[in-house]
Image (tube, rainbow, N blue to C red):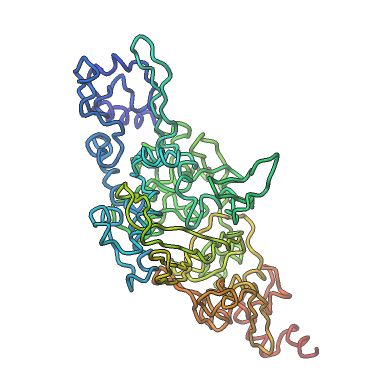
Amino acid sequence: MKFILSILLLNILLFANQKPDNCINCHKNTTKIDNYHPYEDFGCASCHGGNKDALSKENAHKNIVLNPSRLEHASMFCGKCHQEIINRVDKSIMNNMHGVLDVLKYQFKETKTIEQTTGINYLKHKPTSEQSLAEDHFSKLCAACHINQDEKIFNKKYHTPRGGGCVDCHRVEDKEILSIENNILNLKHPKLSTKIPSSNCLKCHNRSNRIGLSYFGKFESEGYGTPYKEGNLTHKIDKGRYYYDLPADIHHTSTKMDCIDCHTEKGVMGDGKHHAHMEDSVDISCKDCHSPTFKPTEQFGLAGMLIALNENMPYPKEIAITKKMNSPLYNVQKEDDNITFYRKKDGKAFNMSEMSDAPYHTSKNHERLDCTACHSSWIPSCYGCHEVYFKNGKQYDWIKHKKTKGKWVELRSYLRYESPALAIGYNKKIMPTAPGCQVITTIYDKNITDEGFHSFAYAAWDPHTTQKHSRTCVDCHFNPQTIGLGAGNLNIKDNNLTFEPYYKSEESGLPINYPIDSLVSKDGVQFQSFSRNQARGFNKKEVNKIVEAYKCIICHNKWDDKIYKNFKQSKIEFYNKKTSCSLEIIEQ
């Protein structure tokens, strides 16, 4: 461990100045950035540019760069030590957001398939007059979450520290002037850290599938502002957005884990490849920790480096690795037969619970299930997002950084939390799904309705509402919402399914002839689309197979029941009237 720490410091000092630059004369009382960028060695100019040999403020500040971590500057400054990471970040979805744009164009019916673009870089060079409706929507609503957003503009408009490149994630304390004495500026330099707090992630990950809110047990409500206590609206997300308290994810309630405790640096900052969608770049899976594969720590130089940077955890013999990208999970460690999870922010140790070999995990009946299908307790569902577009209006474009022609207004009124509907997800496994999203667009030209369209879609994801206990067998096998039919009454009569939905779309004036919360019919006809080629709702055979198991679950509702040891054979014996169950039914 000491050897790795020494190598780390040596590499840093190779790029540090051999003597402090003249900037220190005025900034000598500046607080430190962290333990690995000591300005006594680095000086100021090695990161910020300017003229380090100047004797006046005017000359010293020529060509200075206030934020060297913005991606257009990062290669020149941060790249002296971190160029490989910068190259990966440059291609990542967090930087260019191409996955969001490409899916939006598909859902707006502008492309027949999901065609890959370069996202924000693509729109930077495209004249506003040539942008499609989806591209305009993306530029004015979605692109605000771009990690390289101009934070000065964002702060002035929303007073929220978002954007700025690398510091969008790694800044944990903002700057402030402490005092000015004898022309010496006592400055509190922004503090950087690899121990990224979840609050940094929530700056952006609180819309779309809302996983940042769900993880902490917050469900975005309709906007009534309740509960109302002591004359104030207490449950505010931000201006105009409110939440209810629901069960938080067990990883938060039991160990107060932050996002970085699961998500790897490759999964977040990219692996250098141009992935089409977020799930393609995400590295972590449940089994990486709960059914881990271990390798000697010494095989991973990055692991030793990250342990040294963390400073709060031991250097182990073995660490877990991800099965997808072989990334080191340096906080999941093995010593002899003991597996320990270390929380990154403070190094607190927890015993790691391993996945059991109980029948509900090993049965062939469940081999297609993703872990999230059973262990997700609820999912936020936002139905019928009404997008109103005014052709002659003007709105701020987050890519062009100016107001351009065309204005969007988002309206919502049907938000629910519920047991997740299940479907075949992007990984070809059965996993939670919800609207993602249902667009009903009205377009106005000179305040007269000109045209419009609707595009209803579902998406599968991990809602980040994991619990140790699973959903009940009945909830999966005879809940019409789980099967994808929507809310309503599901019945079986003479082996035929009947379903009466609660929601009547046509009676509500919607331009569809199926319930707004229905993905498929009882016969497996899919009403709404998916933005992934391999994702879909259950077909008729799958719906019938799911419900068929319910007939047994009514009585045999425990997984240690002997009929589940060989369920296929149990069904054969039942239908051949060789079981006590079938005899009782016959007698009745």
Residue 564 appears anywhere in the view = no
Residue 414 x, y percent position in the rendering: 58, 63
The total of numbered circles placed on residues is 0
Q: Is residue 115 above or below residue 244?
A: below
Of the pair 150 and 450, the residue shown nearer to us: 450
Relative placement, left or right, of 32 versus 381 is: left
Q: Is residue 43 above or below residue 567?
A: above
Q: Is residue 391 above or below residue 312?
A: below
Which quadrant is home to the C terminus? bottom right
Relative placement, left or right, of 542 versus 232 is: left
Identity of the residue drawn at 46% across and 67% down: 439
Task: Determine the image quadrant of residue 318.
Answer: top left
Residue 345 appears anywhere in the view = yes
Residue 87 x, y percent position in the rendering: 26, 46
Relative placement, left or right, of 25 versus 506 is: left
Q: Which residue appears farthest toward the right when viewing the image?
A: 588
Residue 481 x, y percent position in the rendering: 61, 71
Residue 10 x, y percent position in the rendering: 28, 27
Task: Determine the image quadrant of residue 26.
Answer: top left
Of the pair 88 and 396, the residue shown nearer to us: 396
Of the pair 165 and 307, the residue shown nearer to us: 165
Identity of the residue drawn at 30% across and 53% down: 120
Task: Determine the image quadrant of residue 372.
Answer: bottom right
Which quadrant is home to the N terminus? top left
Q: Is residue 3 above or below residue 402?
A: above
Identity of the residue drawn at 55% across and 70% down: 366
